[in-house]
Image (tube, rainbow, N blue to C red):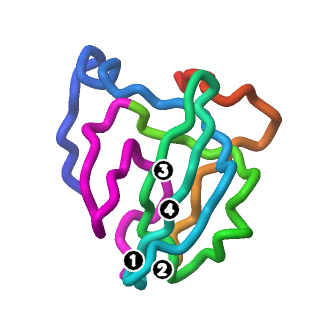
Amino acid sequence: MSQDFIDYEEFARVDLRVGRVVKAERVPNSKKLLKLIVDLGSEERQILAGLAKWYKPEDLEGKLVIVVANLKPKRMAGLVSQGMILAAPCDEKEGKPVILTVEEEVKPGSKVC
């Protein structure tokens, strides 16, 4: 695997936060997208995630997830996504993506370092 290294300053620009999924639902007219409302402590964000093939909305509600909080908003399926939920693997050819969650109770909005 080829490595494209970044320096610490580039990495420090990525704002990773713990978020709690407070609501999840399928996006109408989309087979892939789920609409998640995620509590980031000081605010709630709408995040669209291409996880509908593998996850039921009710299975995500209440989970503590890792969010890229400073990702530029993106319009998809007529809605705006205000962040990204981290999962692995990233390529669906490799199998079901597993959402990165927090094992112990952590306050929503906590910075991941």
Three-letter code for the amino acid on which mark 2 is drawn = Gly
Three-letter code for the amino acid on which mark 4 is drawn = Lys
Instruction: Work out whether 85 lies above or below 39.
Output: below
- Mark closer to the chain start, 4 or 3: 4
Residue of label 3:
85
Residue of label 1:
92
Cβ atoms under marks 2 and 4 closer than 8 Å = no
Of the 4 image quadrants, the one containing the N terminus is bottom left
User: Label 2, label 4: how many angstroms apart (C-alpha)?
Assistant: 21 Å
Three-letter code for the amino acid on which mark 1 is drawn = Glu
Picture coordinates of residue 90 (x, y %)?
39, 64
Residue 89 lies in magenta, yes or no? yes
- Mark closer to the chain start, 4 or 1: 4
- Mark closer to the chain start, 3 or 1: 3
Residue of label 2:
95
Three-letter code for the amino acid on which mark 3 is drawn = Ile
Cβ atoms under marks 2 and 1 closer than 8 Å = yes
Number of residues whose C-alpha sits closer than 10 Å to that of mark 2, classed few (under 14), some (14–19) or many (20 or more): few
Residue of label 4:
35
